[in-house]
Amino acid sequence: MRNAYLKKIIFKNFRIVDTHSDFYGSIIVEDGLIKEIVADVRNSADGAMTIDSRAFDAPVVLMPAFIDLHAHFRDPGSFEKDAPLPSEVLESASLAAVAGGYTTVVCMANTNPVIDTIEKVRNLKTRSDALGLVDLYPVLSLTKNMEGRELSEINDASIKDLSAAGVLMLSEDGKDVADDDLFLAAMKKAKQLGIPISCHCDLGGENDAVRRAIELGKKAGCHIHIAHVSTKEAAEIIREAKKDISAANGFSLTCEATPHHIGATEADARRMGEKSFGRVNPPLRTEADRLAIIAAIYDKTIDAIATDHAPHRTADKAAGTPGFSGLETAFAISLSNLMDNTVHKIGLQRLSALMSANPAQILGLQDRGRIAAGLRADMVIASYMTPWTIDPNNFKSRGKCTPFAGMKLREKILMTLNAGRIVYGGDGIV
């Protein structure tokens, strides 16, 4: 049934949750869109498939599918003769995404070769569209080959060019841009194009890099998005900066946190090996930092949860390459840590905002991220009472490194739909 296209599907007797709503009802999906939301559906006419929530073994919820602002698909990658197989390819990353409930993904440009031209963006997106699992929006790098010397093709690109290619975000990934003048020039171009810049803020330490990105962003009047916020200080810097934003010159500021910074700490890194399997950028922090990130999510300083899915071969992790695979565990780790938090308890509606509605708004996608008539039928069926254990050997991703291996959870993705197509799950429930 995976990747199956059905003209009409009826979702009956579901708890339906998005950023604005939490109610019980039924949804009629037709031609890839949410056609109607009703209290009850008595008949399944016109040969429609009916999926009834009562067919599941545990209570389930129907939510908008997730949107990831930050993932590494490692494609294009090296396929040289006698070289090890790539740590990830488009197909494995896409399968991991839909298994995690994601149907829209922004993938970073630190590939081989670097995605620094519109043609490279177009080639990757065309392949992804043909695969038909996720809507992929490749990032265009800020500088050529991410060398920090001259601007990439953004320098000559038009809004029409980038829109046609599917570029919704710009970034230099973890390299940042060391030269202030060049970074500012890139931000001014981003303002002209109306596209946010994802700033990974690794250069010189997270806290100072966050301050620098915000100050330059103010000068340029562009949209700055701070990636993977992980320290108490960085969250406070962003919190204070948001209080002082003037829309006069167009400056805006958003940010994200990762599930592994929500659910793991430096103690986990030590357990795994700080210089090997437990290494990630930015590193896992203290328990005080972890709680500060949850507090910043609670008070809406942090706008989104993004996976920073960064798969690697086992040998590369053993040698100290930073990164975890996160697409397939993001929902469960986020909900279990946020919903069970006694001080800053965050429920499904807020989680839907963090993983669906807010990312859609940041990217300017108005046709998804919520449950409403006329929007795309990008949806997930999830359970919050289905016991399972995280086993990296079962990941769709080729990357098997996670700080959550062996963890027992109850939150689980059971089905994912992309524009009305079942792209994950569904076997044996209808």
Image: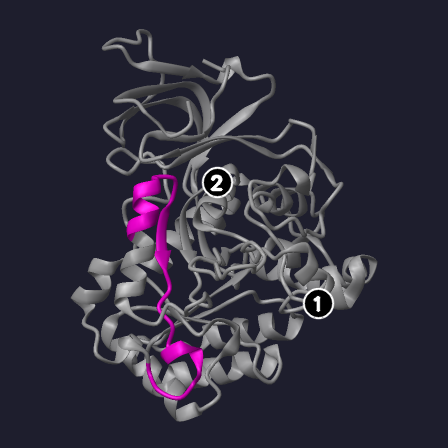
> Which residues make up the magenta segment?
126-151
Residue under the point 42% across and 59% down: 76
Q: Is residue 182 magenta?
A: no
Q: Earlier in the sequence, mark 1 or mark 2?
A: 2
Q: Is residue 150 magenta?
A: yes
Label 2 element class: helix
For disc 1, the marked residue is: 320
Label 1: which secondary element = loop
Residue type (three-letter) at the residue carrying disc 2: Leu
> Is 245 on the left or on the right of 119, as rendered?
right
Q: Which mark is residue 95?
A: 2
Residue 118 in picture, x, y percent from top left = 27, 67
Q: Residue at x 65, y 59 (%)?
A: 261
Q: Is residue 421 visible?
A: yes
Q: Decide which of 273, 313 is in the foreground and name it.
A: 313
Q: Residue 173's x, y, as percent?
A: 48, 71
Q: Is residue 46 or residue 173 the one in the foreground?
A: 173
Q: Amino acid at mark 1?
A: Gly
